[in-house]
Amino acid sequence: MSTVRIVGTVPLKPNWTGRLTPESWSCWARFEALLRADPKWAPEQVESVAAESLRILRHMPDPMSAYPFQGRGLVVGYVQSGKTANYTAVAARAVDAGYRIVIVLSGIHDSLRNQTQKRLEQELTGQQPGWAPRSEGGRDWCMLTTHSEDFAEQDVRILESRVSFLAVVKKNFAVLTKLDRWLQSADSYLGEMPVLLIDDEADQASINTKSNRPPDPTVSDEDDSDDSQGPSRINALIRSILMRTSKAAYIAYTATPFATILINPDAVDRRVGDDLFPKDFVIQLPRPDGYTGTGGVVRCLCPRQGDFAHSPSGGRTGTEGKGRAQDGRSCNWAAAPFPAHVAVGCAHYVLPCRRCAQPAPRTGGQKSYNACSCQPEN
């Protein structure tokens, strides 16, 4: 048996964030102080947000680069586990690094958009609404949306101001059309102004469910008016917004990344450019301390992973029981302690049979919930 002796290591490649000094983090420092002052945030949780947001920033393009860029990335987090806090921290660090415009796509409903607007006004900009006063060591912000109104076109000369801009918008065709048209009219002011676009719940409405117009040099922009051959409308508008500036970074946030990861990495439309495939990075956020997901309620201990439907029996908590495999053999499962009302709900929940794809009979919490429709209980 041969042995391997390590005689040295390859030094880490320098990252562009190395140019940032501790004094550079004015916006992030304000948000960090807000988190530390909140008793709901434990010190180790704040440290995690700090570390993960810096890790994401390192994978983003340098906003001060002399070259144009179109960045694409994906951040995957657990359901209701602090993704909003993470992208708020990323936005704060990005602005400190040189990004000038932050656009947050916040769902498809007014209620979620308004909620996100209020939260970012408090945690990121420090004001509601309008202009944020310059705090000690801080920076000025200009709001392009308010907590009660989505994006509305305004005088493009506002972009002459040496401040940071924030827009929180719905993934709505009319709203994104206005934003895209406004950015197009502001071309002379945008110049090389770096833009960060954060897509919250990126698998909702953002995925291209249609096609892409192939490159065709014989087709002019005037003749290329058939939208039925192009990407789906929301996807096309997001890509068009990103192309309005020569420096843009897109970060998708989701707990269900499958649709985003399965985007064709080579997909290009001749009018709106590259699709949203995360070509630059995919980052999984750590599981927060104290977080309870489905794995904390029921977990399979069977070596034949996932070959059977199972659930807690009789509403018991913190106990072990038996599930039935598709081949009729028994499999052990274990349930972590959880409230009685959750146990009752779990007793009526089963995964579908992997053979017949049918749910198990639901004849009551005490009877045949362990059986699939093609496998008798006995």
Image (cartoon, rainbow, N blue to C red):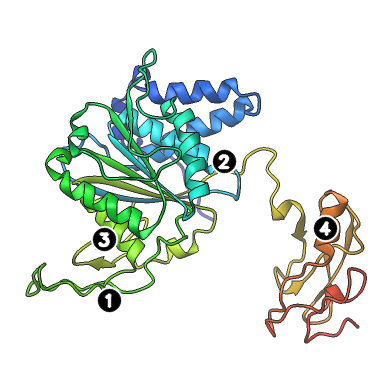
Frontmost of labels 1 and 2 is: 1
Residue type pointed to by label 4: Ala
Q: State the residue lying farthest toward the top.
A: 136
Is 319 positioned to the left or the right of 310 in the image?
right
First reached walking from the N terminus: tag 3 or tag 4: 3
Disc 1 to disc 2, C-alpha distance? 38 Å
Evaluate whether residue 14 shows in this view. Answer: no
Q: Is mark 1 in CB contact (under 8 Å) with mark 4?
A: no
Residue type pointed to by label 1: Ser
Where does the C terminus fall, quadrant-wise? bottom right
Q: Residues within 10 Å of mark 1 (few under 14, many from 20)?
A: few
Residue type pointed to by label 2: Gly
Is 344 positioned to the left or the right of 218 in the image?
right
Q: Mark 3 points at which residue?
A: 274
Secondary structure at numbered mark 1: helix
Q: Is mark 3 in CB contact (under 8 Å) with mark 2?
A: no
Q: Give how far across and how far down residue 343 sits, in percent.
A: 85, 57
Name the image quarter holding residue 176: bottom left
First reached walking from the N terminus: tag 1 or tag 4: 1
Secondary structure at numbered mark 4: strand
Q: Give how far across and how far down residue 15 sits, in percent.
A: 31, 35
Q: Name the residue under label 4.
A: 334
Disc 3 to disc 4, C-alpha distance? 46 Å
Q: How crowded is mark 4: few (under 14 residues within 10 Å), some or many (20 or more)?
A: many
